[in-house]
Amino acid sequence: MGSNSEQEHDDGHVVLFPFMSKGHTIPLLHLAHLFLARRLCVTVFTTPANRSFIDQYLADTSATVISLPFPQNIPEIPAGIESTDKLPSIDLFYPFALATIHMQFDFERALTTLPRVTFMVSDGFFWWTLDSAAKFGFPRFVFYGFGNYALSVSSFVSQNRLLHGPESDDELITVTRFPWIKITKKYFDDAFRGADHNRQASQASEFHVMSVVAAARSHGMIVNSFYELEPVFTDYWNTECGPKAWCVGPLFHHAQDEPHDVLGDKPTWVDWLDKKLEEGSKVLYVAFGSQAELSAEQIQEIALGLENSMVNFLWVMRSKQYSSDTATMDIKGFEERVKRRGMVVKEWVDQKWILMHESVQGFVSHCGWNSVMESICAGVPILAWPMMADQPINAKFVVEEVNVGLRVETCDGSPKGFVKSEGLEKMVKELMEGEKGEMARREAKKLAEVARKAASEGGSSWSTLQLLIDETTCNKNTRFQTISREG
Ligand code: UDP
């Protein structure tokens, strides 16, 4: 990695400030690669504990990485925790996110030492970077990590107070602007619905209002999507809402060498997948992102469902997910029983690489937007099992809008309900061997090709990125009038 101060900035200098959660950081690091490939200088801001993760992604590039101290002595946040996946509970998300405002002083001090910034891409969760952009006179683009479908549906539902009508949580609500879409209150977290009336709810509401206001006053939104994937929702957002959504995805590199683990060795699951391919066996990939919290009871049901389904599977279980003693003991017995056709991995994996592996023919996913994009780009159909945040809406998009997946069967039929082993087994078989699974696979493969073209030279995302660069760099000597939060 290089030093910006030594470099020419004729082609523009972009500052990236990703939020400290993997699902928000990873796509912006891929965006950094795209900017570097278009000859822009890139500076990435982070905190000390996140630095090595970022350095790995930007190794052998000229990007500059600056670590700002993470705020200390934040009530409820243990010392040394600087990313949401390390929080003892995701319930601490709001105190964590609100604490980031204490980084503003150091951020602005660092900006004074940098060459002139052409524009910034800030995570939308850092609402306060709008004021920094206004002070320094450069445009701020926000990145939320959502697709335009989730963004449009949630925003329409919220603005039109659609969740305030029905008495029951199960009553179907028509999203009138898109009347084919029916939702229930259960698609949304309590904090979004205003269904909580505790301290966390007031923190959530304060945080969301500040983020939304700051986003609305920004120059645009960077979206990890491609126009052809969700044209109706991108057009809706850009004509009736705003700020303009720039679809520049899929935000990840395709071609890559075999992955290595932290010690530089080849991870065991690489050989395992290669062996499955040689045998001519199809593999189901099971993973729930970087921060989903599953109960020990739910893990037991997953194990039983996978065991009874008789499919080959690679299951990534995050450490938080198998921390209970009971779950760990049973999982060991389970691993022994299924060792010929199943593998359980407990460390960080290269998910994109796994999804691109020829043996992988299905993905049980929580439908984090990155996982959805990665699966679509690999042409792998999804068994949608959403758990929180935008995931239930993303699952709806996957299953009903672009037909690249099936829904897992929950006990109570609700989008985030408990899943018994039978509900998982039945749908896993359908995904891997059934007709509906095959149809979803065909659609996923078609979309993968569209995604590839969108990101290739001359494609929609490629051209959108160029337009964004042209618009911002041709004005790079102009001081932008970014309106601060105070207006
Ligand atoms: N990821 C990965 N290895 C892991 C776990 C996650 O590479 O062991 C990546 C995954 O490919 C995706 C991101 O982490 O890019 C997770 O983002 P997503 O939106 O799917 O879910 P989140 O973690 O935000 O819930």
Image (cartoon, grey):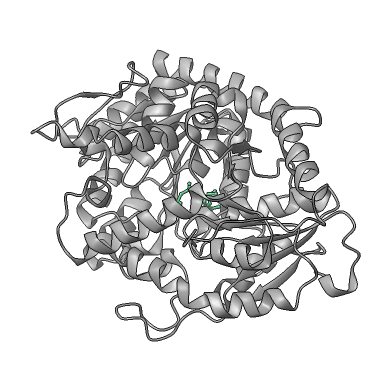
Side of 278 where 115 appears, left or right: right
Q: Can residue 307 be seen by looking at this rendering?
A: yes
Q: Can residue 264 be seen by looking at this rendering?
A: no
What's the residue at 74%, 42% (across, down)? 255
Q: Position of residue 77 (x, y in %)?
A: 35, 77
Number of numbered discs present?
0
User: In what quadrant of the picture does the N terminus appear?
Assistant: bottom right
Spot the residue most to the front. Answer: 487
Q: Position of residue 64 (x, y in %)?
A: 75, 69
Quadrant housing residue 469 = top right
Between 2 and 364, which is closer to the camera in this rendering? 2
Side of 97 where 453 appears, left or right: right
Side of 295 where 64 appears, left or right: right
Q: Position of residue 159 (x, y in %)?
A: 32, 37
What's the residue at 56%, 79% (across, down)? 105
Q: Position of residue 203 (x, y in %)?
A: 28, 64
What's the residue at 80%, 54% (across, down)? 476
Quadrant housing residue 483 = bottom right
Side of 397 where 183 appears, left or right: left
What's the residue at 61%, 56% (across, down)? 482
Quadrant housing residue 185 = top left
Between 277 and 140, which is closer to the camera in this rendering? 140
Vertical placement of residue 67 versus 423, above or below = below
